[in-house]
Image (spheres, rainbow, N blue to C red):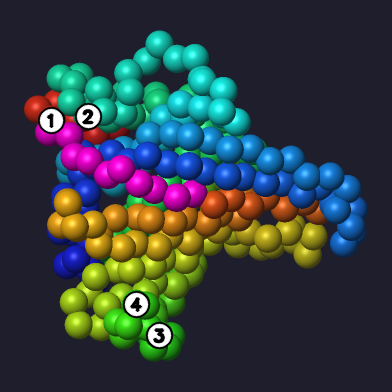
Amino acid sequence: MRAYLVEYESQLSSVVADERFSQRVDYRSGTRTLRSVTRRLESEVGFIRLPGGAEWLGFRDVRKVDSRVVKTKGMTVGEVLASGKDIGTQARTIALASSHHHLGLARTVNVPTAPLDVIHPRHLAAMQFAFDELDTIRGKQMIVLSFLETGRPTLVREPPDGKNLVSSGHVWVDAGTGVVWRVDWMYQHERRLPDAGAPPRLRVDFEPNAELGIMVPTVMTEVFAVPSSASRGEGRATYSNFKRFGTTARIVPQ
């Protein structure tokens, strides 16, 4: 699995896809739902590899919100990847601007590569893995591994004070090849309050893409934080129209 993730990180670099992301927040009083709010985002997502083990960066450029075009003067994801400018800076600028279109709290970690980065070999010292069970996906036998972050400070921290958010979850790995087909990742405070609600969570499923010759994310589901702990936010994203952009751009670690 570790060897696969190192290779896959370079294979997915400079790939762009279309994303359709439906989000919903149920505002509750006890067990009763008072009202619900929905939102649909249509975006381009891109994946880049920064040098020096700095970061595996996925970023989203929201183009439409509930079918209304988002006015922007910046470059598209494809233009960023194909440009001669600093990709890292441009990608982070796009991701930050798009994060405010989400329901719930603004966030940039809800991209398909985020769970893969958590279990990447560069974070080996911070993670504890254990065999959990056997499972099957599309007739292939999978080894399901559990993982728990034991290193401090944690990889994900809560702004603005930087409190540790501990990662944990499961990863479905092809028993014969080490290929990752699914990751279920959540991150939460070290000391959770009884009324804290469900912790933020991402589950990403991958499938082979014949045109690119690699695995690609197909579905991502999310549980996300909302200001009211009694409420719950959920989302589901699907991915299509994968394509690769060549680049001679200068990529600078931040």
* Quarter of the N terminus within the rendering: bottom left
Residue 136 position in % (x across, y down): 37, 83
Question: The magenta stretch spans which residues?
Answer: 237-246
Q: Which residue is mark 1?
A: 247
Q: Earlier in the sequence, mark 2 or mark 1?
A: 2
Callout 2: SS? helix
Q: Which residue is mark 3?
A: 135
Question: How far apart, in angstroms, are the residues tagged by discs 3 and 1?
Answer: 39 Å
Number of the front mark, 2 or 4? 4
Question: How far apart, in angstroms, are the residues tagged by discs 4 and 1?
Answer: 35 Å
Q: Earlier in the sequence, mark 4 or mark 1?
A: 4
Number of the front mark, 3 or 4? 4
Q: Are marks 4 and 1 in contact (CB under 8 Å)?
A: no
Q: Amino acid at mark 4?
A: Arg
State the image quarter where residue 51 is shown: top left
Q: Are marks 2 and 4 in contact (CB under 8 Å)?
A: no
Q: Earlier in the sequence, mark 3 or mark 1?
A: 3
Callout 3: SS? strand
Q: Are marks 2 and 1 in contact (CB under 8 Å)?
A: yes
> How many C-alpha atoms fall within 10 Å of the one at disc 1: few (<14), some, or many (≥20)?
some
Question: How far apart, in angstroms, are the residues tagged by discs 3 and 4?
Answer: 10 Å
Question: Residue at 47% of width from left, 55% of height from top?
Answer: 220
Q: Which residue is mark 4?
A: 138
Q: Main secondary structure of the magenta part?
A: strand
Residue 92 position in % (x across, y down): 37, 29
